[in-house]
Image (cartoon, rainbow, N blue to C red):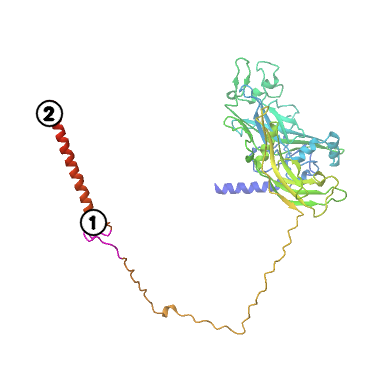
Amino acid sequence: MKKFIGIFCILTILMTGFYGLRPVRGEEEPGEMHTMDVDDGTETGEDDTQVADGSARDVSSKEEIADFPFILEAPKYAFLDRLSNDPKQQAVNAAFSKNDSMAGFLSLSADNRQMLLNAEGLAEMTVTAQIDWAIDNKNDWHYNQFWSTEGKDDDGKDTLGEWAYIGIELTGDKVQSFKVFEDFGDPEDKENTAWNGEGHKTGWKDVVPEEFLKKDEEGGFYYVDWTEHTLYIRVRYEVITFDNDEEHLKKTYFTDWSPVAAFGKDIEEYYPYQMATNLPIPEISDLEAHPGVDGNDAQLSFRVTIDEQFEEDALRTEVYGGIAHLVYNVRTDKEGEWKMIYGDVASKMITIPFSEFMPEGETYQEGMYLEVRAFSYIDQYLGIGGVWCGSLSGEFSDSHILGEKDPEITPEPTGEVTPTPEPTGEATPTPTKDAAKQPTIEAVHEPEAKQEKDVCPLCHLEFDPCFFGICIFIWLAIVIGVFIIITIIVKIIQKKQDEKTDILFR
């Protein structure tokens, strides 16, 4: 068995190397497809993109997609959140993130996007998202080969119904929401193509098993109760380009899938931060100032590092309608006022033009004083469409300073120092006695003289206090004797009194 596994691993490595070394440019066929595999250590599923003619290939380096006007990579985060507390309202909000490069490109006007595409030798580009899903089993995905062919089979016919979330148009937002599992509609309605399907398209009834469905007796519709089931999603991006040449060659690219998001039974839902002390403190490093070159503005740069969980929570609060920032404070005078600059919550290199924080009329001078610090800020809502929870500001980071000279240290005089005379010859060693040859002298212990103490001459005890020279025991005997005599006298008097009383009552 071990030999078999070893042979299998060797063959796998050899095949991986073969495909990884195959050239990409110059060998494409019309309609060729590429996939971007992003190995970020997250659980994204094991499906490999395939097409009917077997022309799918891995595109895993930036050189192979150098003509893209943005960085193409899988969504870093995906989210799922309830839209209603009513179990019969099954619609769920799905959301996913975009990197700064993609969001920036999609935020441009159509004309500016076209200019960038033409500069890269492209005539057209469409960028869309796909959301795959599973219920209760996170490996039971609904992706199939037609997700990579825009839903069409070999004959060009549409095969995917409304349950297959492909071709989702993208916006320029950092995080985008999309509603999944909307109402299935009336199952008895023949015009309900979402449930029943249409032509070669399959409907919800073909992909959702009966054991997952409940029926509302009053409304007559089916729904999935998320208090009893769990929904999983994953998201990827699809890019289709057409070259700006005579052939007008079409190419299709896919990213890997995002990390898996979950919602429903036994899934803990996100809850807003409650205390400012819970917000992480940013860390700033590598602070530098860059003078302007060729008429460009001088810039301040530094690296900021923030807890990755807070980065995810910052996007989550935007899904809910809130906002989160890393707020940078910059000042150019040790006693001056701070200028606040708002940035995204992300660990990255920050570049700020000096014009954003310099006092009006002043310009950057090399060696000038610069101080930077940062803190976390978040504005929150309790879920989608929920109540406002307020805003929180975290603690300041350590300040980092440029242009502050270390104070000069003036040595203080210590007075005249008498030089130590140097030896004029070899020093004569002092003889040391050999301890083994010395006689052992036993220590003589003299007993301490005992202190004279008073002793009672009668009982011979040291602790006996003799009052008026009489032993305490004699005093004790006298007291006991007196007590006995008094008791006897009291008894005699009491007896005579009783006899008188007896005579009077006879």
Q: Amino acid at mark 2?
A: Ile
261 left or right of 100? left
Residue visible at 34% across and 72% down in the picture: 446
Q: Which residues are magenta?
A: 452-462
Give the amino acid at mark 1.
Answer: Cys
The crowding category of the residue bearing disc 1, from other C-alpha atoms within 10 Å (few below 14, some 14 to 19, many at least 20), is: some
> Badge 1 is on which residue?
471
| Residue 24 badge | none
68 and 453: which is toward the camera: 453
| Secondary structure found at label 1 | loop
Between the C-alphas of marks 1 and 2, the distance is: 50 Å
Q: Earlier in the sequence, mark 1 or mark 2?
A: 1
**Residue 454 lies in the magenta-colored region:** yes
Q: Is residue 356 above or below residue 428?
A: above
Residue 52 is situated, as x and y percent measured from the top left of the image, at 72, 34
Could you say where residue 6 lies in the image, as x and y percent from the top left?
Answer: 59, 49
Q: To which residue does mark 2 refer? A: 503
